[in-house]
Image (cartoon, rainbow, N blue to C red):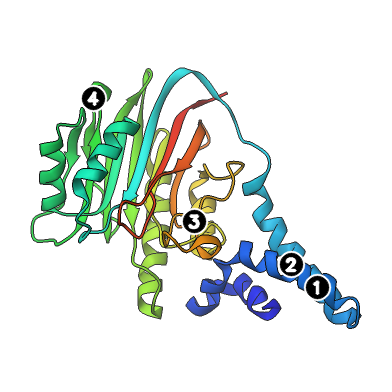
Amino acid sequence: MGIVSILGFVGSQSWLFDLTANFRPQQAAVLLPLGAMALLGYRRLGSALLVIGLIDAALVAPYLVGSGARITGSDRIEVMTFNVGVSNPNRLAVADYIASEDPDVVFIFESSFEWEDAIRASDLPLQIVSVVPRGRIAGVTVLARPSLRPGSIEVAIGGEAAAVTVDLGDSRVDVLGVHPPSPTTAARSGRRDAMLAAAGEWVRDRPGEVIVVGDFNATPWSHAFRGLRRRAGLIDTMRGAGLQPSWPDGWGVLALPIDHVLHTSGLASSDRRTGPAFGSAHRPVVVSIGHSG
């Protein structure tokens, strides 16, 4: 396991190595007590395991402790991202959940025409701003509160993506939603990395503040996720909010945080949380975002 943890640091060299980086919390939880026990009889081995475990723990710690910038003023929007699963039959339950949370902007991934029909029938106080393109089995549906004067933005970064612009107080904020392929092969991993890199370039080219949401199929410790944050100067809303694994639902301590909400430095977040899956493999992520102090 120590070797596996080390390989995660060179994830850009191999998609298999990058997969191991996703399990930093689990590796830290195993390596630290194992290293302490190994010290009793195998001092060098125990010391090595402790060092590797401490490195893993140091990478996880910012998500467990500390806090970022605070929201200033009363202007804020509540953003939700939810990979609902295209074949998930619990559409009315999801619509009821959205109504109960009362968010301002919702990105629904693996949506479909059936999902959009269910949303329209549920009479949510939200406007459908972006729909699944014709000819696609699944895509992104974006909902937003009409009072935010939402508008669709053209985005061409490949894969499953959509973007809208909304009011946040006296300014406009762009919200980009992305769902790259899962990294189950070298080719799919490459497409995921390319899409997240393109998302970073898209954010960097926008003139104002930007929020990025979606099922990234990557944890915060993946090289592709770290590249996106570095390239676009994004802040992860999970930092300081505690580990909030979102996939796969029901896997307990083995679940991973791959559904994300990030934003540029002029914004801040609060009250980040995950919700019930309602039959999806993913749990939704909900967070309030406003201007930073």
Which one is earlier in the sequence, the residue at label 4 or at label 3?
Answer: 4
Q: Amino acid at mark 3?
A: Pro
Mark 3 crowdedness (10 Å alpha carbons): few <14, some 14-19, many ≥20? many
Q: Amino acid at mark 1?
A: Gly
Where is residue 170, by image quadrant?
A: top left
Q: Is residue 145 above or below residue 142?
A: above
- CA separation, marks 1 and 4? 56 Å
- CA separation, marks 4 and 2? 48 Å
Q: Amino acid at mark 4?
A: Arg
Label ID, residue 53: 2
Quadrant into which the N terminus falls: bottom right
Which one is earlier in the sequence, the residue at label 4 or at label 2?
Answer: 2
Are the residues flagged by discs 4 and 2 in contact, CB closer than 8 Å?
Answer: no
For the question of whether residue 103 can be seen, the reply is no
Q: Secondary structure at mark 3?
A: loop
Task: Please name which of the two marks, 2 or 1, marks the residue nearer to the observer.
Answer: 1
Q: Amino acid at mark 2?
A: Gly
Residue holding disc 3: 257
Instruction: Residue at 86% x, 74% y: name it.
Output: 47
Which one is earlier in the sequence, the residue at label 1 or at label 4?
Answer: 1
Task: Please name which of the two marks, 4 or 2, marks the residue nearer to the observer.
Answer: 2
